[in-house]
């Protein structure tokens, strides 16, 4: 009698995921990976199926950022994997620990023209820390456990495991399929082929169930040498105008975010935050949001904690040549990128700052005058922005929209930025309320990450308000995921700043070349599309109705439905000259 539920290697994978603390498995289905999904559900994982493989990987990325546990995405072979590559590269550049499980054709069919069979290893190796193609069931558990450790060790990043389908499906099914492929085997060549295939299957499954999931392997996290810490402490204590810039890499241990927050407050250094570090200080007065370039040029000490000297810092040119420059980074390359530091610590920046703050005894008013100077500039810039919010534009002034959004966002919230000009405008105005409450793609500048990030945020923090800020260019990448939000009952709130343009590009292109070719859109009814995908939609084009519309969106989400607010905005020169290349 045939076993209705024959054992298969998907169970081995699911057991490892559970042991590693994984709760969610993101995917877009495919025959190559069905055993992984079926076993994951049986093991109690929540299987979240998306409408695009990139969304699945973006969601896994966000889970890793918000929880510290590597996110996991399973994608099918060929186009399933190629669709995921941009999101994998984004995770690599954002230093997010991910596990990518990729389906593949059967081991004996590789290179023979099988459906969706491509050289997946060549495709993935440049974008991950480690890529391996498994050849036996017995390799699954140790390889997957190694993948989790490698993804988190040193400089975190994604890893890729290629899993041929004849490893994943039940042994009796694989034997039957290979037997059917060999024919009746009556001739000598046929008998030899049957013998070879049977031997191959024996090797595939031999000892496959002897190794089961164990506890997570130790993870190597770099720490600074005591002499370096001593020198850093002396350098900070002797500074007159220090500036601390904290980036995403400092947030790799989400469970210790509050400890890091307290450490930064104890140090008392004026602090600028970027990436995942936005929100680390909440609304604390140490957090300086504006005029960073001017502060870096005037500072006598600049500490970059998990931030490289890339385009965001003028390739290091924004730091005064007279300042002492300290870099703390897990990446040896980033430590010296574009500018060599006076003191470079190859270490985890969050942990280093916490250690530095221990027994910190500097007077509370040590940098009071310097902090006051920066705070006054910060306040002056806020006043300028407030004045600009009242300037007349067609439809809604985008600055006014962002100020109303800032007023509407609740204390327990996550803000996701997926766009160019509108989202960058919002970043000047909308303030994350707490640590781990801001998500953006990172240095790759990838559009299309928003829906995956919002998906993950609502799963990880179901009680929080999740605000997804779109430009009307970026919304086109993942609007279909409103179907995913609806099916999985995730009441995300999206706000589209719709100005009928790829405005960040158009502003400079039109001025330089006299044409907006390739940058012109129309004010599409994105709110109706959201309704078609199972959510609800609102349209607002009058600035006086923005506050009311935002509250209506909150009410809809509170009732359990995802909602998209399509806000027609005008054009301003708020970010003129800000294009980054």
Image (tube, rainbow, N blue to C red):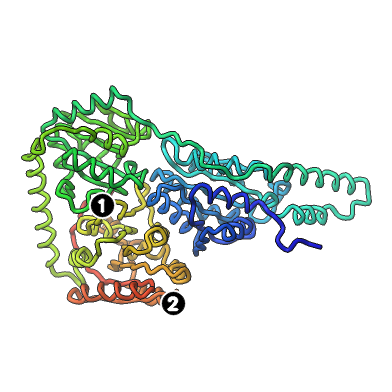
Quarter of the figure with residue 530: bottom left
Residue 119 rendering spot, x and y as whole percentages: 61, 46
Looking at the figure, which quarter contains the N terminus? bottom right
Residue 430 drawn at (x, y percent): 22, 59
* C-alpha separation, residue under disc 1 versus residue under disc 2: 34 Å
Q: Is residue 78 above or below residue 4?
A: above
Q: Nearer the viewer, residue 512 or 445?
A: 445
Q: Secondary structure at mark 2?
A: helix
SS class of the residue under badge 1?
loop
> Any mark on residue 532, and which?
2
Q: Are discs 1 and 2 less than 8 Å apart at CB? A: no
Precedes in sequence: disc 1 or disc 2:
1
Residue occupying the far left of the picture: 369
> Where 339 falls versus 459 (above or below)?
above
Percent from the top left, x then y, of residue 167? 68, 49
The residue at 33%/35% (across/down) is 329
Of the numbered discs in the image, which one, if any, rests on residue 279? 1
Determine the image quadrant of residue 155.
top left
């Amino acid at each position: 009698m045939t076993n209705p539920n024959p054992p298969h290697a998907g169970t081995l994978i699911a057991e490892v995921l559970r042991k590693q603390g994984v709760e969610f498995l993101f995917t877009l289905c495919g025959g190559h990976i069905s055993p992984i999904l079926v076993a994951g559900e049986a093991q109690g994982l929540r299987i979240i199926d998306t409408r695009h493989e990139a969304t699945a990987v973006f969601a896994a990325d966000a889970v890793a950022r918000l929880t510290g546990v590597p996110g996991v995405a399973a994608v099918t072979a060929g186009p399933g994997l190629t669709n995921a590559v941009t999101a994998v590269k984004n995770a690599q550049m954002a230093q997010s620990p991910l596990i990518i499980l990729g389906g593949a054709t059967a081991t004996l069919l590789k290179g023979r023209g099988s459906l969706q069979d491509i050289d997946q290893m060549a495709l993935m190796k440049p974008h991950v820390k480690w890529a391996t193609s498994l050849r036996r069931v017995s390799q699954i558990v140790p390889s997957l456990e190694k993948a989790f450790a490698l993804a988190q060790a040193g400089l975190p990043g994604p890893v890729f495991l290629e899993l041929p389908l004849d490893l994943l499906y039940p042994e009796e099914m694989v034997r039957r399929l290979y037997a059917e492929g060999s024919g009746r085997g009556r001739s000598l060549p046929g008998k030899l082929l049957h013998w070879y295939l049977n031997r191959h299957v024996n090797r595939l499954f031999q000892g496959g169930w002897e190794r089961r999931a164990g506890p997570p392997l130790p993870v190597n996290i770099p720490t600074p040498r005591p002499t370096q810490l001593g020198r850093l402490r002396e350098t900070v204590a002797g500074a007159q105008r220090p500036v601390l810039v904290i980036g995403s890499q400092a947030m790799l241990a989400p469970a210790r975010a509050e400890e890091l927050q307290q450490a930064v407050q104890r140090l008392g250094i004026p602090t600028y935050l970027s990436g995942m570090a936005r929100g680390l200080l909440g609304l604390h007065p140490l957090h300086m949001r504006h005029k960073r370039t001017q502060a870096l040029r005037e500072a006598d000490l600049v500490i970059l904690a998990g931030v490289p000297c890339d385009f965001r810092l003028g390739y290091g040119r924004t730091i005064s040549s007279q300042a002492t420059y300290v870099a703390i980074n897990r990446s040896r390359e980033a430590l010296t990128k574009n500018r060599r530091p006076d003191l470079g610590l190859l270490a985890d920046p969050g942990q280093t700052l916490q250690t530095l703050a221990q027994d910190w005894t500097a007077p509370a008013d040590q940098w009071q005058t310097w902090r006051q100077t920066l705070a006054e500039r910060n306040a002056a810039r806020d006043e300028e922005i407030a004045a600009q919010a009242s300037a007349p534009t067609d439809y809604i002034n985008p600055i006014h929209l962002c100020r109303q959004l800032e007023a509407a966002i609740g204390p327990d919230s996550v803000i996701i930025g997926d766009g160019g000009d509108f989202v960058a405008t919002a970043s000047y105005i909308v303030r994350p309320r707490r640590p781990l409450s801001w998500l953006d793609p990172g240095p790759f500048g990838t559009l299309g990450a928003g829906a995956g990030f919002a998906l993950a945020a609502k799963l990880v923090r179901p009680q929080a308000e999740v605000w997804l800020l779109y430009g009307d260019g970026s919304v086109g990448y993942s609007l279909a995921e409103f179907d995913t939000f609806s099916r999985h009952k995730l009441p995300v709130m999206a706000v589209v700043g719709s100005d009928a343009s790829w405005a960040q590009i158009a502003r400079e292109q039109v001025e330089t070349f006299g044409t907006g070719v390739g940058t012109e859109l129309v004010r599409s009814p994105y709110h109706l599309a959201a309704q078609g995908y199972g959510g609800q939609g609102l349209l607002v084009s009058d600035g006086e109705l923005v506050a009311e519309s935002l509250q209506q969106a909150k009410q809809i989400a509170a009732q359990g439905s995802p909602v998209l607010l399509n806000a027609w905005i005008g054009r301003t020169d708020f970010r003129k000259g800000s294009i980054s290349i």
